[in-house]
Amino acid sequence: MAHKEKSGLATAGMVLGIIGICLSLIPIINNIAFILALLGLVFGIIGIVQTKSGKKSGKGKAVAAVILAIATIGLVLISQKIFSDTLDNVTKNASTTGASDEPKSEASQTATKIEVKTLGDAFEANQVAAEKEWGGKLVEFSAVITNINDGRLSFSEGITSEEFSMTQISCNLKDQNQALNVQNDQTVTVQGVIGEQSLGVIDLSDCKVL
């Protein structure tokens, strides 16, 4: 019985299939595995045809090449689907988290209308509690201007219920040109975000005269 020549394509296809299946679950690199699997599939099919005709031996390797190639292609498609879905979820979660962590802008808040004495008395009684309650909130109130200086309006008269009080409110104008249209002893309605109190002065940022 004559010794049949082994099918080189069957052997090559099986080797490519083994390499491909080893790389099939590694993201990005499995693109190479997909190409190797396609080559291995072609080589395996050709190897089966060669061995079936009786010209060459190695049918087992050819069949193994086809099976490994098909398995590799399937694993690559599944792993890439999982990787893509995971990446989408991470991106969505990051976007959602980033949006929820952003502080509310002044435009997105509704100003709370209050009596100026309500704010002044709260800080006069307990600064820490007042900053916790009112800090970062957009408020609107009316008060008498006692000083205008460098884009700031100061309010110190009638700020608290106390007859003598060092508490003041400093309105840091968002548009400093508004300071040109007001004067001392004028009653104005302002809107701004309450900050901290320092040396008796309550900070009101992003302030504007209505």
Image (cartoon, rainbow, N blue to C red):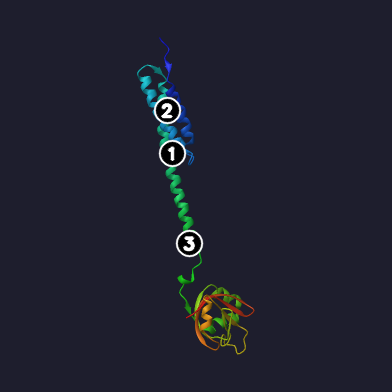
Q: Position of residue 164 (x, y in %)?
A: 62, 88
SS label for mark 1: helix
Whether pointer 3 and pointer 2 mark residues with C-beta atoms closer than 8 Å, the reply is no
SS label for mark 2: helix
Q: How crowded is mark 2: few (under 14 residues within 10 Å), some or many (20 or more)?
A: many
Total labels drawn: 3
Q: In this view, does 188 lie above or below 109?
A: below
Q: Which amino acid does label 1 sit on?
A: Val
Query: In the rendered view, does 64 fall on the left or right side of 201?
Result: left
**In the picture, residue 57 is in which quadrant?**
top left
Q: Is residue 195 above or below residue 8?
A: below
Q: For the N terminus, which image quadrant?
A: top left
Q: How far apart are marks 1 and 3 (CA)?
A: 34 Å
Q: Position of residue 9 (x, y in %)?
A: 42, 24
Q: Nearer the viewer, residue 14 or 118?
A: 14
Q: In this view, does 182 lie above or below 13?
A: below
Reading the image, the residue beneath label 1 is 76
Q: Which residue is drawn at 40% across and 17% down?
A: 56
Q: Residue at x 49, y 69 (%)?
A: 105
Whether pointer 2 and pointer 1 mark residues with C-beta atoms closer than 8 Å, the reply is no
Q: Could you tell which of marks 1 and 3 lies nearer the N-terminus?
A: 1
Reading the image, the residue beneath label 2 is 65
Q: Could you tell which of marks 3 and 2 lies nearer the N-terminus?
A: 2
Q: Could you tell which of marks 2 and 1 lies nearer the N-terminus?
A: 2
Query: Which label was assigned to residue 171?
Result: none
Q: Which residue is drawn at 48% across and 77% down?
A: 112
Q: Can residue 24 be seen in this view?
A: no
Reading the image, the residue beneath label 3 is 99
